[in-house]
Structures are given as structure tokens and as C-alpha cells.
Amino acid sequence: MIVLGLDTSTQTSGIALVDGDRLLADARHAPPPGGGRHADLLVAIDEVCRRAAVTPARLDAIAIGVGPGSFTGLRIGMATAKGIAFAAGRPLWAVSSLAALAYDAAAALAGASLAGEPAAGLADLPGAPAAGAVIAAVLDARRGEVFAGCFRGGAPLGEERVMAPEALAPWAFELAAGAPVRYAGDARAAHPALAPLADRWLPVETPSGAAVAWLALAGPREDVLLGGAPSYIRPSEAEVKYPDGVPGALRR
């Protein structure tokens, strides 16, 4: 089953094509200097498809990381994924971007490569987390906050949260019930308060398209093409500034 995996929750897009148990092609794509965020995402997706010699007609499904993360990036990713799914007549599957980041971190922790060949089921995927491994996936949420999710063996230990960086370690320690916690994500570079966790921080900053695709394959495969929406977790800046609506906007 050929799946196109996408994640645009951060400045760097993750794009990949997997065929069941094989990684066909992948890329980490950052916007060009002076370009808008994910402005040439479709071009990057086309390049990955060309490298894998896969046409839209050969896709069996599209998988998208729904966040949390950059509001603009998530909207672009969801719109792009829906457009491809509609055009190809294929289902759209959704996974947590933080879960995908934790999956990539587990691969790094195990010294595995996502270019491996997974068997069926999450436990046998390349870099799949060991049952006792606890990984906190942490992305920069701006406004002095981070998005965080804590996972053991690929399963969430609690709800994904937005919090102050100082609250991260106590929160993760409590969810892990004393087990060692490893961290991953781009938040450490953005928040000096996370510096004390440097020796426990894995060298994985953003979710990969491969992790999104394989998690989707291992999940319930629910088609969210019509009703799928990004997971923002917190209100947008406009909602915070204008809780009664943007001044001058047309009312329904």
C-alpha cells in the first residue's frame, strides 16, 4: 500500500512515500529565502514522487500530521493533503505531529533508520519505541510556550498540552511515573529555559513524513477527508486579541 506522508507543523516540512514495508523516498523541505512558509510545498511533493516514480494514480492513501504546531503551517498542510486526496480519489488519514516526532525520536534512540523495512503493526516498524521508553515530543509554540506530548511505547501517556517551558520537566516526570524521560523537538533551541535538559535531548527536531505515513498505516485508518481539521490545542492570536470578533469584520 503506497502512502504519501506529510507534516507541516514546523518550518521544515516532512514529506515521504512509503509502500507498506518500504520507504520509497523522503525529504525534509524548508522554504526558500524570502519565500512564504511552505510556499513551494507542492513542488517538493512532486520531486519526492518523481524520485520514487510514483504518480498520484498509484497512491492508496494520503497521511497528514495534524499538529499541534504552526497554525499557518497546519492549515497549508491540511489544505494541500485534502487537495491531493480529492484529486486522486483517495482517503486522508490523520496522525498527531507530536506522535510522529516521538516516533522519529525513538528511531534515533534505538540507532535505527527509517529506511528500514517494517513488518505489519506499530511494534515492528523501524525505530518503533521499546515498551518502557518514555519520550516527550516538544515543539516551539511561540508566545513563550511549547507544545508537548509524552509517549511510552508509541502510546500517549496523557493529553497533548501547551505550557511554559519551565513546566515541561515536572509534567513529563509525573506522566512517566519516575521512568527516565528523553526529549526531542525544536523547542530546545528556542527556549533557554530548556537548557538543563540538554543531556537528555535527542537530535531530532521535526516530524518526518515517513513517521506520519507509518503511524497512519498502523492506526485505525479513519478517512478524515471531509471533516478533518488541524489540532491547534490553544486559541489563535486573533481569537485571543479579539474574543468578540475582529473589529470591522462582517457579522453573520
Image: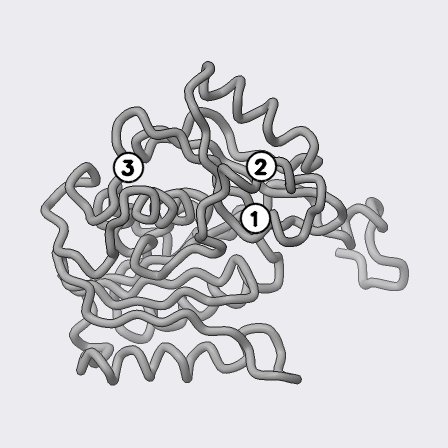
Estimate the x, y position of residue 32 in percent, counting from the top left: 56, 83
The number of callouts visible is: 3
Q: Residue furthest top?
A: 177
**What residue is rendered at 21% in x and 81% in y?**
55
Amino acid on which disc 1 is placed:
Leu
Position of 242 compared to 6: left or right? right
Disc with the residue nearer the chain's start (1 vs 2): 1
Estimate the x, y position of residue 146 in percent, counting from the top left: 64, 43
**What residue is rendered at 19% in x and 70% in y?**
24
Amino acid on which disc 3 is placed:
Pro
Position of 64 compared to 16: left or right? right
Estimate the x, y position of residue 197 in percent, counting from the top left: 58, 37
Alpha-carbon distance for marks 3 and 2?
A: 20 Å
Mark 2: secondary structure: helix
Within 10 Å of disc 3 (Cα), the crowding (few <14, some 14-19, many 20+) is many
Position of 188 compared to 215: left or right? right
Within 10 Å of disc 1 (Cα), the crowding (few <14, some 14-19, many 20+) is many
Q: Which residue is denoted by mark 3 in the rendering?
A: 129
**What residue is rendered at 63% in x and 53% in y?**
189
Residue 89's place in the image compared with 183, above or below, is below
Circle 1 or circle 2, nearest the eye:
2
Report the front residue among 136 and 100.
Answer: 136
Disc with the residue nearer the chain's start (3 vs 2): 3
Residue 85's place in the image compared with 241, above or below, is below
Q: Which residue is denoted by mark 1 in the rendering?
A: 139
Occupied quadrant, residue 75: bottom right
Marker disc for residue 92 = none
Occupied quadrant, residue 163: top right
Q: Which residue is denoted by mark 2 in the rendering?
A: 197
